[in-house]
Image: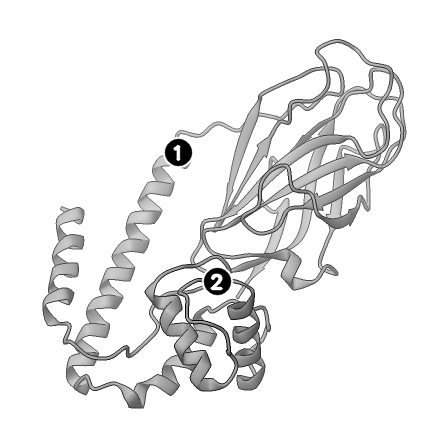
Amino acid sequence: MKSKLFISTILVVALFLPAVTFGAFENNLFYGSRGDAVTELQKFLTKEGTYSGPVTGNFFSLTLEAVKSFQEKEGIVPVAGYFGPKTRAAANSKLAPATSTPKNLTEQINALLKQVRELQKQLSLLEQQSVTSTQVSVPVSVATSTATSTTTQQSLPGVVIEAVSPVFGAPTPIVGTGSGVTVGVFKVTNSGDSAVYLSSLKFSKGGVATTSLSFSLFVSIGGGSSADASVLYGDAVTGTTGASPTVLFIISGISETNRLINSGSWRYLTIKTKGVTDNNDTFQFGVNALGDVTYSAY
């Protein structure tokens, strides 16, 4: 029944849409987006004087900088290059006088589109509830002496964090480990409708180790791979092996660009040792409670 209603609404919108020039931006756009909406965005930014590159339909560095310039000109914060609700509203207000669609028909179309978006949100929530209701959280074990493939997933409002156990070392005991050894990899995915900015991450820590050791946290680019650890987020503020059951990283001081996760995108987090460990030390990292990952949404 819900699927029929969803399809019927779309058909009604399609029947009433007139053949007019581009009138409004309906979707959020961000680095890596492609398609007609990006083409129209590049044309709009060209008219606004913030974009001078080719109209390609690809949202990459030139378009990102042009969006930032437009945000600065319009007084929109944060100036992150994310073409979200605030920036779309500013752009649409400039496009409104150019549309040739009758006002009453525009209102009808917008009302129908609003219903479609609400139905999409409801369907998305139903799908998430179906997944999380059957999901079981288990601790992640990443040991310096054993290769493992255990994974776990923890659902938060709008954000999903997934621990990915790296294939590490040999399945037999080894003689200590050096500094900079990977002992945990996590994937943080933004499944919400708005961009988010990570602010702190707290990991539960276990394992068997005698070394008092600190850890460093690295992050990939947005939409990057698990092998990417190009940006240093920081060092553990609390907790070393044998001293605390948790390791906390406060990253609010990192630039917004490196903390941003756009809607539908992700980042990989990599935990590495900061010193040499003793023979056969092992480590376990996990995220097991709501609030262990904090972020802001704009």
Q: Position of residue 235 (x, y in %)?
A: 81, 46
Rendered view: 169 above or below 181: above
Observer-nearest of 157 and 254: 254
Tell me: 15 left or right of 278: left
Select label 1 or label 2 by which is in front: 2
In space, the residues marked 1 and 2 are separated at their CA atoms by 31 Å
Please rate how many residues cluster around mark 1, counting C-alpha atoms within 10 Å: few if below 14, some from 14 to 19, many from 20.
few
Q: Amino acid at mark 2?
A: Phe
Tell me: 161 left or right of 101: right
Residue at position x 32%, y 76% from top? Answer: 24
Q: Amino acid at mark 1?
A: Ser
Q: Which residue is mark 1?
A: 133
Rendered view: 80 above or below 173: below
Tell me: 232 left or right of 104: right
Contact, mark 1 vs mark 2 (Cβ under 8 Å): no
Residue at position x 44%, y 64% from top? Answer: 29
